[in-house]
Image (spheres, rainbow, N blue to C red):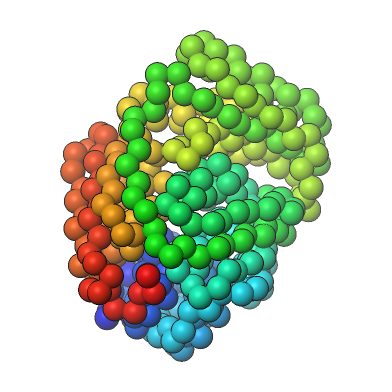
Amino acid sequence: MTLDGSHGEGGGQLVRAALALAVTLRREVTLTSMRARRPKPGLRPQHLTVVRALAAISEAEVRGDALGSTELAFAPRALRGGEHRFDVGAERPSAGAVSLLAEALVLPLALADAPSRLTLVGGTHVPWSPPVHYLTAVVFPVLRELGLGVSLDLRRWGWYPAGGGEIEVRVVPARQLGRFVPGAPPARPRITGLSAVSRLPRSIAERQRRRVEERLAAAGLDATIALEEDAHALGPGTLVFLALEGRAGFSALGRRGRPAERVADEAVDQLLAYLASGAAVDDHLADQLLPFLAVARAASAFTCPTRSRHLETVAWVVRQFLPVGLELSGERPARVAVTPEPPASREGVVP
């Protein structure tokens, strides 16, 4: 199978989704024109780590796994659970997101022959990627609803640009994955969150939390916001993270010259926009769930705020690998319906 890596969103998510499905289904795949329209085309350190990590757990034969490569041939042979360690900065110093690496690895390991323990090193809280708290509060609770045993331990925070964070992810395979049919958020949802700082004054974390609480109270919402005043990390950083467990998560990172209140406002604005949409899950969770639901045993359906290019791209990738019924309808909110085919029609899947 050959896939155009510039299709749709044409970024790292296409690469991750395609290779994760290739390993899960034991399908050979060639990706061309990877990230072709990006300012720096081809594989960057974080993408290369995903390629090599997925190759390691599947004994894959790989051609084109080099920085800047725009074409990749990937032939997985056998999927094995076990203990693995992967460092996003192994090839070149990088604060690439370990959350995205974890999301790519958990899909095939969900159907492996044995439990797995992954040690992942890199950025845990970096721009343009979900923080690891998003996995623990949003993604992993849903995967547990589907029947998968998965957990995460944050050992060291890794901010941009220093990186150096470390997490441990444990995966206990599922005999089969179930369905996901969530309802809309309740009128008064249970909101939890975190205001955290590393190597910076506690007062910054306190100001962030106070602003979040004020904004949410003004909107008639209750929240429990924890405070982390000295998150263990190699460099400084600040975070505001807000979640509706197993449904949605929103975050904002501080930077030099940016007031704590503006960091809080960014996260709160995202949360309020999501609640106003009436959707069941947030946009990122929607596209992350599609591959899992496509290899499940029962039909799933949910809504998300928008029909994003990421969602459409992942749906396209899933359809290339599986004869699945996958329907996207509507715009704001968008509705997603997934009807998996029987396991007998899936080449290589271990049910």
Tell me if 37 is positioned left or right of 110 in this view.
Answer: left
Tell me: residue 160, above or below residue 198. below
Q: Residue at x 25, y 74 (%)?
A: 344
* Count of numbered circles on the image: 0
Tell me if 310 is positioned left or right of 193 in this view.
Answer: left
Q: Quadrant of the C terminus?
A: bottom left
Residue 37 in view (yes/no): no
Q: Nearer the viewer, residue 103 or 198?
A: 103
Image location of residue 70, percent across then percent down = 40, 76
Q: Nearer the viewer, residue 23 or 35?
A: 23
Tell me: residue 82, above or below residue 135. below
Image location of residue 1, percent across then percent down = 27, 81
Q: Residue at x 58, y 69 (%)?
A: 115
Q: Residue at x 54, y 57 (%)?
A: 149
Residue 56 in view (yes/no): yes
Q: Residue at x 53, y 27 (%)?
A: 191
